Image (cartoon, helix red, strand yellow):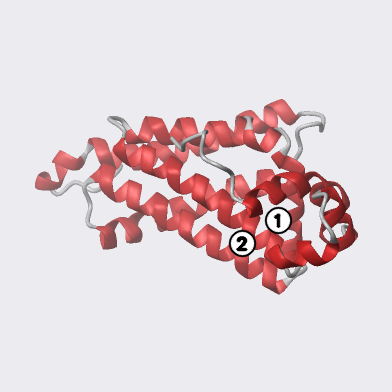
Amino acid sequence: MPDSSAPVPRGDEILDQIRGTFAVKGFDGASMQDLARAAGMSVGNFYRYFPSKAAIVEAIVRRDLEGVERDFAAVVSSDDPMARLREILRYRIEVELCEEDAPLWAEITAMAHRNPEIAGICERMETEIRRAFLGIFARVTGQPPAEAEARFAAHAAFLVMLVRAWALDWPQKRAGAVELKSLLLRSIDATLDEVARCEAQGASKARGLPCGA
């Protein structure tokens, strides 16, 4: 857990101050002047930290990825990695993407469809997350990394896709949102259950049984 008494880097402090403006006005609607004003800075000083809106998105993604890396480190060190992973994904869906982060990530995800630079930033993030999933799956099933990647690449990609779709659509206020969220969480559980079956059958390798047999 990070030391809460440590000073917040100035760049991160600025991100906290501008994220609401960025989420409400959007990538195209929020000018650098708007963002500098939200941060309580002159435009010239603001540019010293973030020379472009793409740089802001990259910083937001970087910081989110650092949080993901901490979460996955907690999964790996857990006595029950799969249970911990379920908890983290559920928290991501039920809390983080249902509160103040939801409009921001909906906007960033939508931007990626319009802006190749933002798309590249988001793709690099998703690649890192897929790799982290595969590392966890290799650990819990006892499979070599190459075998785990061959067996579970689609599972990792599907989990990333589910979370991304929820962030993009942000349907929390739509009719049927509760049922939709329940269906999403069941899909996540079913995907992890397939991996868990391989974990449970690790001893069956000696008998030549495939995962899920």
- Give the quarter of the image for residue 112: bottom right
Measured as percent of width and height from the top left, residue 135 is found at 34, 52
| Of the pair 66 and 9, the residue shown nearer to us | 9
At x 57%, y 51%, the residue is: 63
Q: Residue at 28%, 50% (x, y): give it.
A: 138
Residue in the foreground of this view, choosing between 1 and 132: 1
Q: Which mark is residue 119?
A: none
Q: Left or right: where does residue 1 sit relative to residue 185?
A: left
Q: Which residue is mark 1?
A: 109
Task: Please say whether residue 28 is visible from this viewpoint.
Answer: no
Crowd tier of the residue under label 1, counting other residues whose Cα lies within 10 Å: few below 14, some 14–19, many 20 or above: some
Name the mark on residue 122.
Answer: 2
Give the quarter of the image for residue 52: bottom right
> Going by the image, does 26 lie left or right of 181?
right
From the top left corner, tell me how far across and down residue 74 is, in percent.
Answer: 38, 38
Q: Residue at x 21, y 47 (%)?
A: 142
Q: Tell me the element at label 2.
A: helix
Q: Amino acid at mark 2?
A: Cys
Give the secondary structure at mark 1. helix
Residue at 50% from the left image edge and 50% from the top image edge: 66
